Each structure stands twice: as C-alpha cells, then as structure tokens.
Image (tube, rainbow, N blue to C red):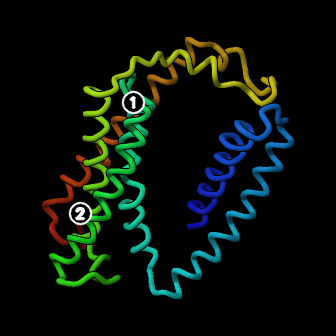
Amino acid sequence: IVSTGSAESIAVSSLVAYDIYRQYINPEATGDQILFVSRVVIVVFGLFMGCFAILLFEIGLSLGWVYLFMGVVIGSAVVPLWNMMTWKKASGTGAVIAAWTGLVLAVTGWLVAAKVQSDTISVDALGTNEVMLSGNLIAILSSGAIHYVYSMFIDPQDYDFSELDKHITLVEQDTRGLTDEEKDPVALRRAERWITRRGYALTLVLIFIWPILSVPAGVFTKSY
C-alpha cells in the first residue's frame, strides 16, 4: 500500500507539473520551479487521498471493493491509451470517444449485472466478483472495439513516431549523468527491443500461462 501510494503521488505530481504547469502555465519553467510544483502537488494530493480514504472507510467501502471498482471507471481508457502509444493509425478523437463511451457502457453493465444477480442494487450486490468482472470486461473490451473501428474506418491516422523525438525536450539540457553509450540511438533502439520482447513475454506468462497452470488445483492447497 505504501509503494502504491508513493507511485500514485509521483504520477499525479508529474502529470500536473509537466502536462499542465509546464505545458500551459509556464512553458519556460526551470527544473527548480517544476520540482517545487511537484512537491506542492504531492502534499495536496496526499492530504486529499487521506481524507478520501477516511470517507470511504466510514461509508463501508473496503479496499478490495474500491480496487475492483477502479477497473469499471478507468478500464475503458486502457486500450485507447495503449493504441495511441503503439499504433500509428490510432485516432485521438476516437480514443476520447471510446474511453467515455466505454465508461458509460461499463457502469451500465455493472449496475444491470448486480440487478440480475441479486435483484437489487446495493454495495454488497455491486461488489461481488461476477458483477465486478462484468463491469471490468465491458470497460476494456467495448472501448477497445470502439477505438479500433473508429481508427480503422472513420478517422484513420498515419502518425510517424519518429516525430516524438522533436517534441520531447529536456527541462534543462543537462546530460552529465548519461554516458555516450546511453545517448547512442542504436543502443537505445536495442534497449527498446529488449524491453519490448520481455514485456510481451511477461504479459503472456502472467495473464495466460500462470492462470492456466493453476486451473488443475481448483481450490489451492498448501501443498499445491
């Protein structure tokens, strides 16, 4: 939980500092200014999340319930974002439409599943594994299908990913911590291939192979 909170704080502070403050408020921001904004955001975000956690606890929502619910409300952004980072035909407009439409469908399916299974809509009914799974799957699959169709047939793009190098700039041109090899484009491409291959392999193991190997156990025992 501590590491998760730390990662979330850093992610939010980086988002605000770079994508909002530096992009729209102060494009010429120095490293010290960005660091100050990041620290302020971490403190504010930490206080907010602390109060929010107390509120959730008081109204009876467990950590597991909230964790599964996250998939319902943000799962629809996963595939569109992945496509935007890896697929040259991905449409930005389509990604927005897919994410919001997927959210609406996921919440609707989540509520309907609770009603069908328990004949009522309550915290307990919405928190069952089957109902949460329905909402999560609808979020991920519907948004992915919508973005694919939109990008292929309505607004196909042909983005050149080499353009990214022209738009990603350092806050300060300070490369003292990098060796010549770490700045070599050939070495960077080699590292990218290394990471990509192992990332796909690990994804295959964790999402498919590992669960399949656990099927024969049925109910896990200590010996298994």
Check disc 1 and report its element: helix, strand or loop: loop
Label 2 sits on residue: 134
Which quadrant of the figure has residue 30? top right
In this rendered view, identify the residue nearer to me: 215 or 116: 116
**12 horizontally vs 175: left or right:** left
* Image spot of residue 64 (x, y percent): 41, 73
Name the residue at the front extreme: 154
Check disc 2 and report its element: helix, strand or loop: helix
**3 horizontally vs 14: left or right:** left
Q: Is residue 31 above or below residue 128?
A: above
Q: Specify the label residue 32 is tagged with.
A: none
Which quadrant of the figure has residue 45? bottom right
Which quadrant: the C terminus? bottom left
Who comes first in sequence, dot 1 or dot 2? 1
Q: Residue at x 29, y 68 (%)?
A: 132
Q: Is residue 178 visible?
A: yes
* Image spot of residue 220 (x, y percent): 23, 70
Q: Residue at x 63, y 13 (%)?
A: 184
* Image spot of residue 82 (x, y percent): 40, 37
Q: Residue at x 47, y 15 (%)?
A: 160
**107 horizontally vs 177: left or right:** left
Q: How many marks?
A: 2
Label 1 sits on residue: 91
Q: Is residue 133 visible?
A: no
In this rendered view, identify the residue nearer to me: 76 or 207: 76
Which quadrant: the N terminus? bottom right
**215 horizontally vs 133: left or right:** left
At label 1, which amino acid type do we have? Ser
At label 2, which amino acid type do we have? Ser
